[in-house]
Image (cartoon, rainbow, N blue to C red):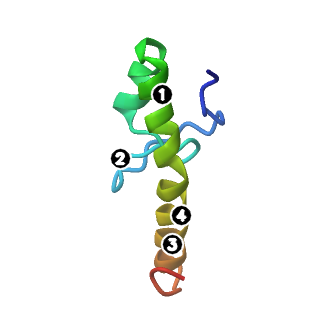
Amino acid sequence: MASPCTRVCRIDARSGLCAGCQRTLEEITLWGGMTPDQRRAVLASLPERRKARRSMVRWRHGGQPGT
């Protein structure tokens, strides 16, 4: 199973998530040793993390949270 890494590796200090792949530093570090089920669980969480990040970025730039 391929890594979701996008090669935009920067951990956000507030969220603790990579700005590129939306994984935690622990998930990134452990990825190679995870079982397929563990990897699927991480992958399943990424769309919601991306959505939350987009909302927060808009809010930081003057938009409304959740828009």
Instruction: Give the x, y percent position of residue 66.
Output: 48, 80
Three-letter amino acid code of the residue under disc 4: Lys
Three-letter amino acid code of the residue under disc 2: Gly
- Which is in the foreground here, disc 1 or disc 2? 1
Three-letter amino acid code of the residue under disc 3: Ser
**Front in this rendered view, residue 29 or 49:** 49
The residue that appears at 51% across and 47% down in the rendered structure is 46
Circles 1 and 2, Cβ within 8 Å, touching? The answer is no
The residue that appears at 49% across and 58% down in the rendered structure is 48
Distance between the Cα atoms at labels 2 and 3?
16 Å
Q: Hey, which quadrant is residue 7 in on the image?
A: top right
Under circle 2, the secondary element is: loop
Residue 51 — which label? 4
Under circle 4, the secondary element is: helix
Instruction: Give the x, y percent position of residue 55.
Output: 51, 72
Name the residue beneath numbered marker 3: 55
Circles 4 and 3, Cβ within 8 Å, touching? The answer is yes
Instruction: Give the x, y percent position of residue 51.
Output: 53, 64
Distance between the Cα atoms at labels 4 and 1?
20 Å
Three-letter amino acid code of the residue under disc 1: Arg
Name the residue beneath numbered marker 1: 39
Q: Earlier in the sequence, mark 4 or mark 1?
A: 1
Location of the C terminus by quadrant is bottom right
Circles 4 and 2, Cβ within 8 Å, touching? The answer is no
Q: Earlier in the sequence, mark 1 or mark 2?
A: 2
Distance between the Cα atoms at labels 4 and 2?
15 Å
Name the residue beneath numbered marker 2: 16
Q: Within 10 angstroms of label 4, few (less than 14), some, or many (20 or more) residues?
A: few
Q: Within 10 angstroms of label 3, few (less than 14), some, or many (20 or more) residues?
A: some
- Which is in the foreground here, disc 1 or disc 3? 1
